[in-house]
Image (spheres, grey):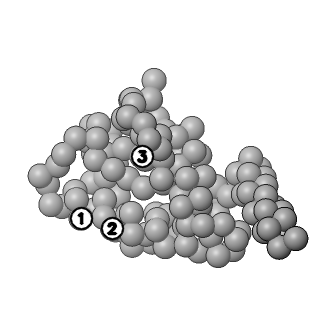
């Protein structure tokens, strides 16, 4: 009986996340908060330039990653700061929606992938870097 209740609640949580994602509500909660946390305008500009140059891309876990290794410590610090802000946002979303932070990040990544401009890179979970066409 207890196992069935757990499975039912897990399914309910998965459905709630799916519904939030499909309705765009999840994106509305996740994305506007990401830039506002733990990043400066200079860090955002640095990462945006690196994304446009194909050095940095969006990953399936909801975090930024390096498409090609970087030796620029300023860019590495900017990516780390943005990822730290995203981590906090995913934790907040997880608490509000009763999912894991990893699930919140992955759901946000799906939305980010669909909104990437052509020419930028993304990497699905367990996949390779791909340039969006």
Residue sitting at x 39%, y 69%: 84
- Give the label on residue 77, or none: 1
Is residue 55 positioned above or below 97 on the image?
Answer: above
x then y, percent, for residue 74: 18, 61
Could you give the CA–CA distance between mark 3 and mark 1, rounded to whole angstroms? Answer: 16 Å
When asked about the image quadrant of residue 27, the answer is bottom right
Q: Residue furthest front?
A: 1
- Whether residue 49 is visible here, answered yes or no, is no
Residue sitting at x 71%, y 69%: 97
Answer whether labels 1 and 2 touch (C-beta < 8 Å).
yes
**Secondary structure at numbered mark 3:** strand
Is residue 72 positioned above or below 1 on the image?
Answer: above
Is residue 118 positioned above or below 52 on the image?
Answer: above
Could you give the CA–CA distance between mark 2 and mark 3, rounded to whole angstroms? Answer: 15 Å
Q: Which residue is mark 3?
A: 58
Q: Quadrant of the C terminus?
A: top left
In this rendering, position of residue 123 left or right of residue 100: left
């Amino acid at each position: 009986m207890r196992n069935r209740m757990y499975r039912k609640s897990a399914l309910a949580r998965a459905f709630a996340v799916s519904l939030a994602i499909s309705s765009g509500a999840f994106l509305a909660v996740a994305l506007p908060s990401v830039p506002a946390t733990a990043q400066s305008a200079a860090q955002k500009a640095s990462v945006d330039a690196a994304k446009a140059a194909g050095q940095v891309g969006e990953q399936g876990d909801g975090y930024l990653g390096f498409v090609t290794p970087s030796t620029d410590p300023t860019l590495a610090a900017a990516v780390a700061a943005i990822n730290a802000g995203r981590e906090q946002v995913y934790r907040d979303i997880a608490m509000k929606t009763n999912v894991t932070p990893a699930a919140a990040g992955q759901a946000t990544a799906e939305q980010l992938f669909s909104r990437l401009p052509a020419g930028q890179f993304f990497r699905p979970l367990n996949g390779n870097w791909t340039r969006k066409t």
